Structures are given as structure tokens and as C-alpha cells.
Amino acid sequence: MKKVSLILFILCFILQVNAQDLYEDALTAASYAYSHSKKAHGANNVYHTQEYADKAIEAFLKVETLAEKCNCTKANETAYQARVDMESSLNQDTYERSRFFAKRAKELGSQILKELTSCRANNGSLGNTKTASIAQNNDLAEATAEVANKQKELEEKRLQLEIEQQKLEQQIAEQNRQKAEFEARRAAEFKEQSLIKSKAENALRNLEKALQELSMVLNEESKFESQADYYVRSENDLKNESLNDTKTFYANRAKELTQTAIQQFNNYNIIEN
């Protein structure tokens, strides 16, 4: 009986050690994958990007296998997606697009480290293990810091966008206020222009009528030519001019009318008795 118990204990110990080795191997492979992905993304030319991408693909493939053996489903799926992205990086024809997929794989690489660590911690018999290597802990800490920095960067961008949005809204509000003020001033000015038009045209008609009557008094055979076509307008004509333009128009028509009258009166032959 004691021999059976000893054998069972040894078997359990061996299984535990083997499982622990799988986690260690998976984390080591994930560390390599993350490191190579980061180098691929940070490379300054296509050659180096693809060189590190090849190494990262090999490491991600190993993580897939080990994660499956550890029953870490999330890590297995994430490693698969990271490998697909890194393979896509190799198939791009431009440096920018190659780095784009390398960046995605790098971000998934940091996620794999967290998922493997969480998976190992949640395994009952291995929950209290503390044998993770210093390199793995450093990579995990670096990945965590990178995620935190990314979140901070996104938050700063969000705040900046809010500030810019507020400025834009203030500019739009100011433009609307100025537009409303302009439209109010223009409406008041147009109203005054219409009033001046009505009074000026009426006054010019009266002036023209008086000049016609005076012309008949001085010379019955004379006929004063009407100038109404030159000063009678529609209100649409006022829309494209200012108040001063309207006043100037009718002032000029009055001058022309009186000048025409003077020329006509100069041509009269007055016979002395």
C-alpha cells in the first residue's frame, strides 16, 4: 500500500513538473515572440522588419503549440492571430504596411504574456509557483507598461480632441453671432434704402413735373423730356448696394435731371416786346 501511494505521489509530482515546464516554455517562447515583434516594428527598413518577422513567426507558432498543451485557449487563439499578422507583414510591398502588421502582432504579443501568466495562475496545482524567469517578468512588465503608456496616450489625445472640439464650437458660435448681427444690420439698412427709394423717386417725379410745367410756361411749343426711366428702379436693385450707394444714385439722378433742364432752358428763344 505504501508503495502504491509513493508511486502515485511520484506520478503527480512528475505531471506537475511537466506542466510547469510547459508553462515556462510557453512563456519563454512568448517572450521571444514579443521581443522579435517589437524589433520588427522598430526596424528602419524592410529587410530588418522581415528578418525579425521571420523569427517572430517561428516563436508565435511554438506558443500556439505549447498554449494548446497547457489548455490556455485564449493564449492559443491570440498567438494564432499574432502569427497571421506577422505573416501578413512579410507579404506587404511597402515599408509602412509591413510595419503596420508588425505593430499589431507586437501588441498581441504583450497580450499573450498576460494570458499565459493568468492561465498558469488559475491552474490549481500550480497557482503558487514562483519560478518564472527574470527575462519573462521583465518582458511582462514592459508589455504592461507599454499598454499603460498606450492608454495614457489615447487619453491625452481624447482630451486634446475635446479641447479642439470646444474651440471649434466656440468659433462656430461666434460666426453664427456675427452672421446674425450682419443680417440684422443689413435688414435695417435695406429697410432704410427702400424708404429712401420711395421718397427720392417721388421727389424726382415732382421735380420733373415742375420742370415740365415751367417749360410749358416759358415756351408752349417746348416739351420737357421725361427722365423717369433713369431713376425708377425695383427693390431688387437695392440688394447689391449699400445705403450710401443708394443715396449717391438718387443724388446723381437729381443732378442729371437739373442739368438736362438747364440745357433745355438755354435753348429757348425769348422774344422781347
Image (tube, rainbow, N blue to C red):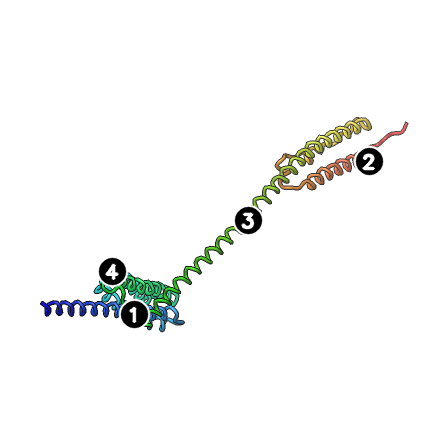
Q: How far apart are marks 1 and 4 (CA)?
A: 20 Å
Q: In which quarter of the image is residue 143?
A: bottom left
Q: How far apart are marks 3 and 1 (CA)?
A: 55 Å
Crowd tier of the residue under label 1, counting other residues whose Cα lies within 10 Å: few below 14, some 14–19, many 20 or above: some
Q: Are marks 1 and 4 in contact (CB under 8 Å)?
A: no
Q: How far apart are marks 4 and 2 (CA)?
A: 112 Å
Q: Which amino acid does label 2 sit on?
A: Asn
The residue located at (9%, 67%) in the rendering is: 1
Judging from the image, what secondary structure is the residue with disc 3 in? helix
Q: In this view, does 268 lie above or below 244?
A: above
Counting from the top left corner in percent of width and height, residue 93 is at: 35, 67
Judging from the image, what secondary structure is the residue with disc 2 in? helix
Residue that mark 4 sits on: 73
Point out the tag, 4 or 2, that comes first from the N-terminus: 4
Residue that mark 2 sits on: 266
Point out the tag, 1 or 4, that comes first from the N-terminus: 4
The reply, left or right, for residue 44 in relation to residue 233 is left
Q: What residue type is labelled 1?
A: Ala
Residue that mark 3 sits on: 170
Q: Is residue 68 above or below residue 194?
A: below
Q: What residue type is labelled 4?
A: Thr
Q: How far apart are marks 2 and 3 (CA)?
A: 67 Å
Numbered tag placed on residue 109 in the rendering: none
Q: In which quarter of the image is residue 135?
A: bottom left
The reply, left or right, for residue 68 in relation to residue 43 is left
So how many labels did they put on this image?
A: 4
Judge depth for marks 3 and 4 and give the one in front: 4
- Nearest the camera: 202 or 29? 29
Judge depth for marks 2 and 3 and give the one in front: 3
Q: Do the residues labelled 4 and 2 touch (CB within 8 Å)?
A: no
Q: Farthest residue toward the front?
A: 2
Residue that mark 1 sits on: 132
